[in-house]
Amino acid sequence: MSSSVLLPLAEVTPLPGSTYIIPALFLFFFATTVAGALVAVAAQRIIRGVCGLAVCCLGLAGLYYFLNSPFLALMELLIYVGAVCVTIIFAVMLAEPDEPAPTGSLPRRLCGAAATVVVAGAIFWSLARLGVFGRWPTLALDTRDWSVQKIGVELLTTYSFAFEAISLVLLVAILGALAIARSGRHNA
């Protein structure tokens, strides 16, 4: 009878800088979300705003993936980038190409922008303090099966109302695009 000798596994040495990859990707998706939101809000032309919205949704999908929710990330891509943004782009393509000039004087617009920044900063600061210093309960680890088949069954049984609400959001987006396109053609 021969005796087998177990050799120890080789030590795995991490690559230099590998500890920074995940935080760097998280910051990349965070920056993508913020940059897309800023472009969507600050754009003068609607098509640039829609592109900013799409970039923002791509960043959100990356953040959802980091939260261990790849299904939600995929739904973010399919519903918001794939449906809502494309519908808005179709409405822009069907509507009149002329956009009205911005109304209001420059000081008034700057005052509105400053007020917006102050309110957004206050909300961000409050939520950041709540997130860092708040007492959050420790949740039990969810060990249920979350396969694609299980998610499909849950969507069509337990969460059918939410699933239908999402389809209504898409329907409203399509109707809004058609309304914009129709009113744009009749104004000419």
Image (spheres, rainbow, N blue to C red):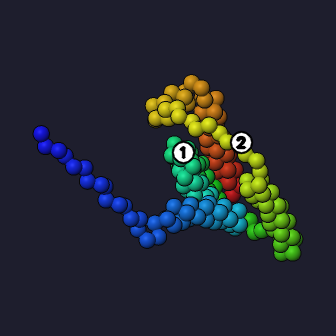
Q: Nearer the viewer, residue 136 or 185?
A: 136
> Can residue 78 be spotted in the picture?
no
Q: Is residue 89 left or right of residue 6?
A: right
Q: Mark 2 belongs to which amino acid?
A: Pro
Residue 48, percent from left and from top: 62, 64
Q: Dot 1 lies on which element? A: loop
| Crowd rating for badge 1 (residues with CA inside 10 Å; few <14, some 14–19, many 20+) | some
Residue 180, percent from left and from top: 67, 50
> Can residue 153 be spotted in the picture?
yes
Query: In which image quadrant can residue 1 be found?
Result: top left
Residue 16, percent from left and from top: 43, 71
| Crowd rating for badge 2 (residues with CA inside 10 Å; few <14, some 14–19, many 20+) | few
Residue 77, percent from left and from top: 53, 49
Q: Nearer the viewer, residue 123 or 46?
A: 123
Disc number for residue 29: none
Q: Mark 1 belongs to which amino acid?
A: Ser
Disc number for residue 69: 1
Q: Residue at x 58, y 64 (%)?
A: 27
Q: Residue at x 17, y 44 (%)?
A: 3
Q: Residue at x 35, y 60 (%)?
A: 11
Disc number for residue 137: 2
Q: Quadrant of the C terminus?
A: bottom right
Q: In the image, is residue 58 above or below residue 160?
A: below
Q: Earlier in the sequence, mark 1 or mark 2?
A: 1
Q: Residue at x 77, y 51 (%)?
A: 134
Q: Dot 2 lies on which element? A: loop
- Which of labels 1 and 2 is toward the front? 2
Q: Is residue 26 left or right of residue 119?
A: left
Q: Nearer the viewer, residue 60 or 67?
A: 67
Outermost residue toward the bottom in this view:
106
Q: Nearer the viewer, residue 37 or 174?
A: 37
